[in-house]
Image: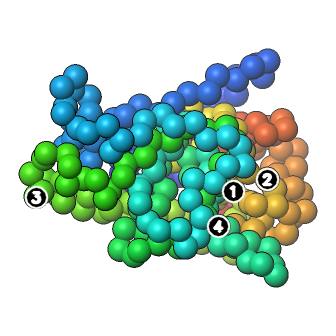
């Protein structure tokens, strides 16, 4: 994956539509692509046993695909919609670890362990593809090819996470929110998805938790950006109007 960089292109928002079309990420832009290529899922006669790959599984808003400490079984790729991962805390607010957009992987960090280190929940009605790693020996492909594909998959995931952390390390509330919006836009662009205008599916509270800010601070900052003409926010829909100005805020 290309490292996250902040775009400086002028952007014009499309007029609001009465009904937004939810798009699925193309397989070639999906984080599971290295492994799926080895398994040749695009081929009509791949010979892969049923149930090794569960494609386009529907996940309802609020549904979890795995919980913290569940036994590790699968890696998931978001095909449509979005998810959040978090560490539940019985006596406190859960700790948000990240948001996962179309094309991005969920659960890959558990490969080295026996259980998932967090819970993953859908932020909206979504679809995922699921590969059950425990059944990979049944695929009939050379073990070396499968292992190399997993190494490539994990390497991309580590590079992505490092770039994401670097992109969001900022001081002020405005810098954090600006970096967050631009990182979402860049991530969608890299996956071939609409990136100038997109659904902000996470709550202001979740954004604040993730960025270390109060939800009220997030809301006020988004309002300031909107009044300044940098973005346009309508309910859950956000349009990045002046990415260059948001990038300048980050560099202040």
Q: Is residue 20 left or right of residue 111?
A: right
Q: Earlier in the sequence, mark 1 or mark 2?
A: 1
Occupied quadrant, residue 13: top right
Spatial separation of the CA atoms under disc 3 and disc 2: 43 Å
198 shown above or below 151 = above
Which SS class for mark 2? loop
Residue 37 seen: no
Choose mark 1 or mark 2, whichever is in front.
2
Q: In front here: 208 or 34?
A: 34
Q: In front here: 247 or 180?
A: 180
Query: Mark 3: few, some, or many residues within 10 Å (few <14, many ≥20)?
Result: few
Q: Which residue is mark 4?
A: 86
Q: Earlier in the sequence, mark 3 or mark 2?
A: 3
Q: Earlier in the sequence, mark 4 or mark 1?
A: 4
Q: Is residue 36 left or right of residue 221?
A: left
Choose mark 4 or mark 2, whichever is in front.
4
Labelled disc at residue 178: 1
Which SS class for mark 3? helix
Which SS class for mark 4? strand
Percent x, y for residue 239?
Answer: 71, 36
Query: Mark 2: few, some, or many residues within 10 Å (few <14, many ≥20)?
Result: few
Q: Earlier in the sequence, mark 3 or mark 4?
A: 4
Residue 131 seen: yes
Q: Which residue is mark 3?
A: 144
Q: Which residue is mark 2?
A: 203
Name, please, the residue furthest toward the bottom. 91
Q: Is residue 145 left or right of residue 22?
A: left
């Amino acid at each position: 994956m290309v490292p996250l960089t902040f775009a400086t292109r002028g952007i014009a928002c499309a007029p609001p539509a009465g009904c937004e079309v939810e798009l699925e990420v193309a397989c070639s832009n999906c984080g599971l692509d290295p492994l799926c290529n080895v398994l040749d899922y695009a081929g009509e006669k791949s010979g892969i046993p049923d149930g090794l790959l569960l494609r386009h599984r529907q996940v309802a808003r609020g549904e979890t695909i795995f919980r913290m400490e569940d036994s590790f079984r699968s890696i998931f790729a978001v095909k449509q919609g979005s998810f959040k991962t978090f560490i539940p805390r019985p006596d406190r607010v859960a700790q948000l670890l990240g948001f996962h957009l179309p094309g991005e992987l969920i659960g890959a960090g558990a490969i080295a362990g026996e259980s998932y280190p967090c819970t993953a929940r859908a932020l909206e009605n979504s679809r995922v593809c699921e590969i059950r790693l425990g059944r990979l020996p049944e695929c009939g492909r050379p073990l070396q090819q499968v292992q190399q594909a997993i190494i490539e998959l994990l390497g991309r995931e580590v590079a992505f996470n490092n770039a994401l952390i670097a992109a969001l390390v900022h001081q002020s509330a405005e810098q954090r929110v600006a970096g967050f919006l631009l990182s979402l836009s860049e991530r969608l662009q890299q996956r071939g998805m609409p990136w100038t205008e997109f659904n902000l599916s996470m709550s202001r509270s979740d954004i604040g938790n993730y960025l270390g800010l109060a939800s009220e601070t997030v809301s006020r900052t988004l309002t300031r950006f909107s009044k300044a003409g940098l973005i346009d926010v309508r309910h859950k829909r956000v349009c990045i109007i002046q990415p260059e100005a948001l990038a300048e805020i980050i560099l202040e």
